[in-house]
Image (cartoon, rainbow, N blue to C red):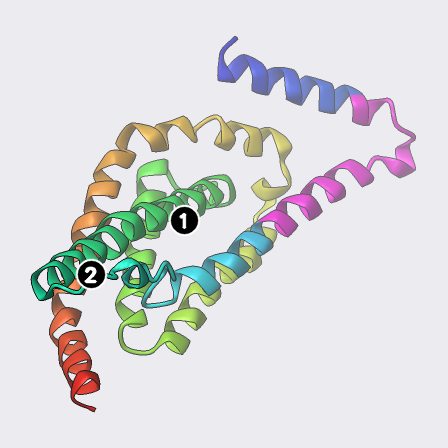
Amino acid sequence: MSVAEISEGILEFYNDFVLAMPENLKIIPPVFFIAITLTVYSLFIWYFHRFLARRDVLKLNLRKYNVYKHDALIKFFAVLFYVVEFLIVAPIVIFFWFMGLSICFIVLAKELDVGTVMLICAALISTIRITSYFHESLSKELAKMVPFTMIAVVLTDPNFWNLSTTISRITQIPQFFSTSIYYLLFIFAFEALLRLFFLPMQIAVSIKDEKE
């Protein structure tokens, strides 16, 4: 069964269900649907801004496993743990947040095609990551402001209240996965570049701490 057939079945069931309800209660299903959608979206953005706006998106602290006493081994594993945590694991996690944000925007921003939505989300996440290296408070505000502004915009869009249009947008989500690999590679490269610029400052602070 194709995605289109499933969506048509869901829409048909929904319409039959609403038609069977008393006239004065027909407002309940769409209101309930919108409320659930906005609740899920708001919760996602809440965790999104708290997580992605941190300079160090992960708190793995892999350095605590570097228990070797030989200087060469200490330096080797220090570099290895740094690469694993910040240049491999972190970009993958950031990509999953990008994926979640893109899917949310695909459903909500019904006037935009999937490609444009992905570009907007990639630009937003890139900006959030850049500002997190300067001031995390600014990054957090940015990570909240744009997605929450989206709610105000879509609530005034007549298409947002149309379940048929919403389901049609959901069926376009598979288009995201066909090009998502390029965005994953972009996030890897972008995060590595940010770390490259930040690394000298981090080394200087580390040397200062050792002297103290």
Identify the residue position indicated by label 1 in the image.
97
Q: Which of the two residues, 75 or 134, is positioned nearer the viewer here?
A: 75
In the rendered image, the residue lying farthest to the top is 1
Q: Picture coordinates of residue 125 (x, y %)?
A: 33, 57
Q: Is residue 100 toward the left or the right of residue 25 in the image?
A: left
In the rendered image, the residue lying farthest to the front is 69
Please, what is the three-letter code of the amino acid marked with disc 2? Answer: Tyr
In the rendered image, the residue lying farthest to the bottom is 212
Residue 28 painted magenta = yes
Give the mark, 2 or 1, whose residue is nearer the N terminus.
Answer: 2
Q: Is residue 206 toward the left or the right of residue 175 in the image?
A: left
Q: Which of the two residues, 114 or 162, is positioned nearer the viewer here?
A: 114
Q: Which mark is residue 68?
A: 2
Q: Secondary structure at mark 2?
A: loop
Does any portion of residue 27 appear in the rendered image?
Answer: no
* Rendered residue at 72%/24% (across/down): 14
* Rendered residue at 39%/42% (across/down): 99
Does any portion of residue 128 appear in the rendered image?
Answer: yes
Q: Which residues are magenta?
A: 17-40
* Rendered residue at 50%/31% (across/down): 170
